[in-house]
Image (spheres, grey):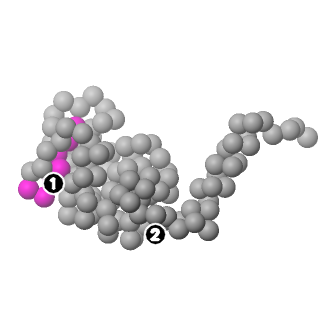
Amino acid sequence: MQKPTDAHRRQSRSHARRAAVKVDFAALNQVALAQSLNICRWLLRDGRVQGREYLALNPRRADSTLGSFKVNLTTGRWCDFATSEDRGGDLISLTAWVFSLSQSEAALRLALKIGIKPEVR
């Protein structure tokens, strides 16, 4: 039997810490929507507000057209209309997409960013 490497031990400890933290997605989304403009400015720099939408450049491709990437500030839904492939239904999924995280990792990062203390089990 092989001995676990240091990398395996770190990964196991990291997984155990994540498993012990719980974030209420519905409550987080509700609080996040109240701060949607600040969250968009954090995730998508150099954007601007037009009506109820935040227009930005897609941070994950060579985007040169401001506004092809939009976030609805009321609902949290977002989409890159130039590709129609990058889209999501809330600010947690936007956080996950921008930082290439799982939904649970993104929820934790977003919760900490906006001052919600996650429940530790």
Q: Quadrant of the C terminus?
A: bottom right
Residue type at numbered disc 2: Asp
Mark 1 crowd level (few <14, some 14–19, many ≥20, 10 Å Cα): many
Residue at which label 1 appears: 53
What residue appears at the point 87 percent right and 38 percent down from the top-left corner? 2
Q: Which residues are magenta?
A: 51-57
Is residue 78 shown left or right of residue 66? right
Q: Position of residue 68 (x, y in %)?
A: 18, 41
The total of numbered circles placed on residues is: 2
Residue at which label 2 appears: 24
What residue appears at the point 71 percent right and 36 percent down from the top-left corner? 7
Q: Position of residue 15 (x, y in %)?
A: 64, 52
Name the element at disc 2. loop
Pick the residue in front: 69 or 113. 113
In this view of the protein, can residue 97 be seen by the observer?
A: yes
What residue appears at the point 38 percent right and 60 percent down from the top-left corner? 115
Pick the residue in front: 84 or 74. 74
Residue type at numbered disc 1: Glu
What residue appears at the point 15 percent right and 37 percent down from the top-left corner? 66
Residue 10 image-quadrant placement: top right
